[in-house]
């Protein structure tokens, strides 16, 4: 059983003069706009609950204004939630005194801000040192760790610049380095890569994942970008108007969009990079099993019946032996060569269930035969055929 | 009967003036100890600044001064070279001066030649050579028209008043930014201090602190303290929310927030407050002279009573020169 690190229960955050006024209306099920019109209060976070296990990256997605930043700010109480419970490793954050909260933030969290939150009067180096300075880490260690963090985000040589001399993407990386430098237990990242160009973005994502290979850090990660969410996220939550409308693993989100809102989100994802062989494989309509005495005639019959031109051949353990094309089967009959069935079976490439469509593209392109998906023991799990590859690439195909 | 009573109520004058008088009397009677202490402190400050700039100093003090100015410049420019050049330059200036005026003069920091070269060097390193030229020309002119002592005294008065105003004003501004009760209490007091004609509080100041530089300084402080308070407050309240959040998110304590986030972020605004404070203090020079403060205000006042256009103009020009000099040295780079 994985260890729970963050647990949020029924969290509410309402902005305005009289937040309590809004609760009866929320219970009645009024929308965010109606509540704003009636009471002048803005619903920021509405009844959000989730848990994040140790070492997990929990991704929060949602359109602008859906309450992602508000949610992440409630976790370390940069904003005071109105109702609800936040447990971090069994500490109830909402019960901490000012002093305790200060120490708790110092010990536990590293935060990356959507708008960077860099100190304009400090150099890059000094900005990155900030968290360590607050912790009263001694200067030599502090400088060293800051320099390492700057190196990790690829900003060597910029140490002595002020933030105003950096581009947006570079500023964002300084913010990231600042959080990395303190080496916290929990990362709170509010769109940490949003200002980066695609190339550096990919590099940073890979860096992050690489970092997590070494030590897994529990992370709440906000993003707008579904591709990013699918790449880094262990669990994904989609927010709308303060509520979590769907939460689950990558595949669950992709294949079972709970409603139109989620479907819209999933729509423009670059599916080829995300969908794995196991997501798009289908059950073969039929197989040829020579071990059960099936010969070329059965093969031809099965192919005719299913209107296919080749058939996958498996042994008694469901191990893939190869493929038999209809021409070959006919040749066997012509040559009366029934005993040598194996000679006519062609070897075919196989794919791993974890391969993405990107990985399989070369094989898919010249696919006029089905591609078997096999597990570690070479056992057949399913097949991939050209038509379902193409239909999966078309975004509308989400059920 | 009733009618007469109502009329008498309306003809009754609220004894506002009398009340204030009583309060002042009460303070004089009951707090003479602390007041004298305070007067002593202010006097001490003024005298020492005057001595610092003007009167004889042993050579060791001179060297300490040069080192202090070097450090000052280093802290402003963060450039060791510039600071060292300045320090060296000042030593060279002392030696050049000694050629002209004899070695005894090295013992005196007060010779105009040294003061002028010191200010010129500060102006040069802190800002530009153009400002340094202006300083040299301006101060040399004052020396030439024999207002030198007044210039120095004015400088001493202003430095004292500004220091007192900042020592009180910046912390008040900080507290005001963090506590809304303090804010609501201080705001009307500031409005009051900024708008009430200074002549009005000259009299109580006179009664409390006697005729002389101290009263003048106090009046100047009252007149000039509002901008540092207001601009410190403004600077701190306008610090970007995201950097406040960043500070908090990393677990900064209250003091860390203040010294690592708020004050540095508010520094431009606070510097503006200091600059404004200096300017207002200068504009009080003439008024303060009415209650016995020395410096350039005195000749202006004399000129007024004697209708001496020339003298008035000369002294007025002195104020302008000091104003421009201080404004440019302590102002923001544009
Ligand atoms: N300090 C605040 N005072 C009042 N309302 C706020 C405040 N902060 C956020 N809100 C409101 O809360 C809602 C959620 O805002 P939030 O910043 O959490 O959105 P977001 O999902 O982070 O959006 P984005 O993707 O643009 O960053 C919005 O309707 C916003 O108007
Ligand atoms: Mg946001």
Image: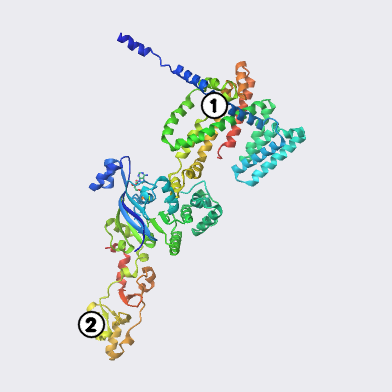
Task: Tell me the quarter of the image containing the C terminus of chain B.
Answer: top right
Q: Nearer the viewer, residue B44 or B323?
A: B44
Horizontal side of B102 relative to A332 (left or right) equals right
In the rendered image, which residue does mark 2 sit on?
A: A301
**In the image, what residue occupies the spot 40% across and 58% down?**
A218
- Mark 2 sits near ligand 1, with its Cβ under 8 Å away: no
Q: What is the crowding at mark 2: few (fewer than 14 residues within 10 Å), some, or many (at least 20)?
A: few
| Residue occupying the point 31% across, 10% down | B3
Work out whether residue B165 or residue B282 is closer to the camera in this orientation and state it: B165
Residue B63 image label? none
The reply to whether residue B199 is visible in this rendering is no
In-image side of B257 versus A16 (left or right): right
Residue with the mark numbered 1: B34
What's the chain of the residue with tag 2? A
Q: Position of residue B310 (x, y in %)?
A: 64, 21
**Where B239 falls versus A188 (above or below)?**
above
Residue at point 66%, 32% (across, down): B52
- Quadrant location of residue B302? top right
Mark 1 chain? B
In the rendered image, residue B159, in percent from the top left (x then y), is placed at 59, 31
Q: Foreground: B68 or B299?
A: B68
Applied colour scheme: rainbow
Question: Would you place residue B241 above or below residue B13 in this image?
Answer: below
Determine the secondary structure under disc 1.
helix
Instruction: Write down the quadrant of residue A343 in the picture.
Output: bottom left
Q: CA distance from mark 2 to mark 1?
A: 115 Å
Residue farthest along the top direction in this orientation: B1
Image coordinates of residue B286 in percent, x first then y, are 58, 23
């Amino acid at each position: 059983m994985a260890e729970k690190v963050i647990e949020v229960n029924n969290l509410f955050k309402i902005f305005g003069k009289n937040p309590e006024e809004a609760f009866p209306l929320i219970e009645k099920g009024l929308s965010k706009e109606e509540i704003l019109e009636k009471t002048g209060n803005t619903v920021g976070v509405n009844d959000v609950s989730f848990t994040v296990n140790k070492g997990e990256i929990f991704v929060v997605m949602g359109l602008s204004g859906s309450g992602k930043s508000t949610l992440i700010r409630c976790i370390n109480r940069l904003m005071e939630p109105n109702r609800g419970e936040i447990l971090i490793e069994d500490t109830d954050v909402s019960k901490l005194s000012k002093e305790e909260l200060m120490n708790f933030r110092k010990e536990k969290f590293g935060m990356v801000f959507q708008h960077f939150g860099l100190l304009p009067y400090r150099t890059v180096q000094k900005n990155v040192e900030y968290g360590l300075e607050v912790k009263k880490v001694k200067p030599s260690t502090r400088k060293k760790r800051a320099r390492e963090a700057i190196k990790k985000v690829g900003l060597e040589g910029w140490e002595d610049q002020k933030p105003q001399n950096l581009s947006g993407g570079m500023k964002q990386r300084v913010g990231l380095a600042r959080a990395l430098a303190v080496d916290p237990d929990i990362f709170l990242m509010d769109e940490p890569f949003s200002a980066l160009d695609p190339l550096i973005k990919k590099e940073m994502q890979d860096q992050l994942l690489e970092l997590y290979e070494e030590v897994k850090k529990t992370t709440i990660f906000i993003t707008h970008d579904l591709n990013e969410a699918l790449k880094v996220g262990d669990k994904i939550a989609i927010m709308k108007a303060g509520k979590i409308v769907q939460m689950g693993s990558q595949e669950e989100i992709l294949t079972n969009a709970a409603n139109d809102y989620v479907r819209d989100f999933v729509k423009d994802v670059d599916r080829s990079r995300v969908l794995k062989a196991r997501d798009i494989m289908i059950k073969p309509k039929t197989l040829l099993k020579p071990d059960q005495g099936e010969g070329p005639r059965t093969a031809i019959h099965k192919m005719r019946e299913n209107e296919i031109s080749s058939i996958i051949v498996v042994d008694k353990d469901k191990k893939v032996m190869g493929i038999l094309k209809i021409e070959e089967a006919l040749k066997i009959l012509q040559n009366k060569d029934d005993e040598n069935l194996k000679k006519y079976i062609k070897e075919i490439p196989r794919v791993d269930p974890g391969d993405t469509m990107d990985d399989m593209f070369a094989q898919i392109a010249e696919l006029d035969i089905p591609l078997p998906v096999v597990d570690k023991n070479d056992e057949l799990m399913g097949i991939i055929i050209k038509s379902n590859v193409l239909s999966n690439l078309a975004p509308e195909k989400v059920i | 009967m009733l009618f007469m009573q109502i009329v008498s109520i309306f003809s009754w004058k609220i004894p506002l003036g009398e009340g204030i008088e009583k309060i002042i009397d009460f303070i004089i009677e009951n707090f003479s100890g602390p007041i004298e202490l305070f007067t002593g402190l202010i006097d001490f400050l003024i005298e020492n600044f005057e001595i610092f700039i003007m009167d004889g100093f042993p050579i060791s003090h001179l060297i300490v001064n040069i080192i202090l100015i070097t450090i000052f410049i280093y802290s402003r420019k963060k450039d060791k070279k510039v600071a060292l050049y300045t320090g060296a330059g000042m030593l060279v200036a002392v030696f050049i001066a000694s050629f002209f005026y004899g070695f005894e003069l090295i013992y005196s920091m007060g010779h105009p030649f040294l003061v002028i070269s010191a200010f010129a060097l500060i102006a040069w390193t802190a800002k530009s050579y153009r400002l340094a030229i202006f300083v040299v020309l301006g101060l040399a002119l004052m020396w030439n028209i024999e207002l030198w002592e007044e210039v120095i005294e004015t400088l001493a008065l202003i430095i004292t008043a500004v220091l007192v105003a900042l020592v009180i004003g910046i912390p008040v501004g900080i507290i005001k930014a963090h506590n809304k009760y303090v804010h609501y209490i201080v705001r009307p007091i500031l409005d009051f201090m900024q708008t009430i004609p200074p002549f009005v509080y000259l009299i109580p100041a006179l009664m409390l602190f006697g005729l002389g530089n101290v009263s003048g300084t106090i009046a100047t402080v009252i007149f000039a303290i509002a901008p540092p308070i207001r601009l410190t407050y403004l600077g701190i309240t306008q610090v970007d929310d995201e950097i406040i959040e960043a500070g908090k998110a990393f677990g900064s304590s209250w003091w860390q927030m203040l010294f690592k986030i708020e004050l540095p972020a508010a520094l431009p605004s606070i510097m503006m407050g200091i600059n404004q404070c200096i300017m207002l203090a200068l504009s009080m020079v003439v008024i303060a002279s009415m209650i016995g403060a020395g410096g350039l205000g005195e000749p202006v006042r004399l000129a007024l009573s004697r209708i001496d256009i020339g003298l008035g103009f000369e002294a007025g020009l002195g104020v302008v020169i000091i104003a421009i000099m201080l404004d440019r040295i302590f102002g923001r780079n544009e």
